[in-house]
Amino acid sequence: MDRSDALVLLREFTKNESLVKHGLAVEAAMRHYALSGGHDEDRWGLVGLLHDFDYERWPDAPDHTRKGAEILRERGLDEELVGAILSHAEWNTDEYPRDSPLRRTLFAVDELCGFLTAAALVRPERLQGLRPKSVKKKLKTKSFAASVSRDDIRNGAELIGLELDDHINNCVAAMSAIAGDLGLES
């Protein structure tokens, strides 16, 4: 499966444009970390792009990820990538632990990208100039983007061995590179 196949699959299962944009944001962050870590940028990007492709159809655990994994296998996606996608959901970590850079990074960027999108949407400048200090202030406001797990964001940074500020900066930079596609240009 290549990126164009993955985009077709994402759009086949996901009609909500915000969810499509989330896939694009996570893809950008995954590509950023793949490049900086010497990993295969295209493979890591596919994992980011497809990690939630089944969420709109099957939002509840454990169907979310498991139903999608069946489809991904049928469509020929490499088992390493399917396993990484399964690992981002807590209910799968016994069978698919976060035991590789790919799996740890997907977990680390998923919630943060969602939170950064929410933070950017309430700023006139969107992603431009978004700094860790501002993001961390919003993280303390429990009512802001309330469905985003603050623990997952903190644990994700720790899991990939980064200070939260550095992780935020990396994800903002990755998302800024595709800000137009995300509807987050200033």
Image (tube, rainbow, N blue to C red):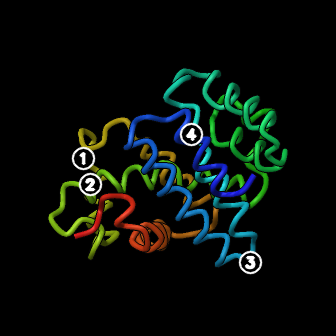
Report, in whole angstroms, how far the alpha carbon at label 2 lies from the one at label 1. 5 Å
Q: Residue at x 74, y 37 (%)?
A: 72
CB within 8 Å, label 4 to label 2: no
Q: Using residue 76 as the reference point, say whether residue 85 is left or right of it.
A: left
Report, in whole angstroms, how far the alpha carbon at label 3 lies from the one at label 4. 25 Å
Where residue 51 sits, quadrant-wise, is: top right
* Callout 3: SS: loop
* Callout 1: SS: loop
Give residue 1's position: percent from left, percent from top.
75, 51
Q: Which amino acid type is shown beneath numbered disc 3?
A: Gly
Q: Which amino acid type is shown beneath numbered disc 1?
A: Thr
Mark number, residue 141: 1
Mark number, residue 7: none
Which tag, 1 or 3, sits closer to the chain's start? 3
Give residue 121's position: percent from left, percent from top.
24, 55
Mark number, residue 38: 3
CB within 8 Å, label 4 to label 1: no
- Mark 2, mark 3: which one is toward the viewer? 3
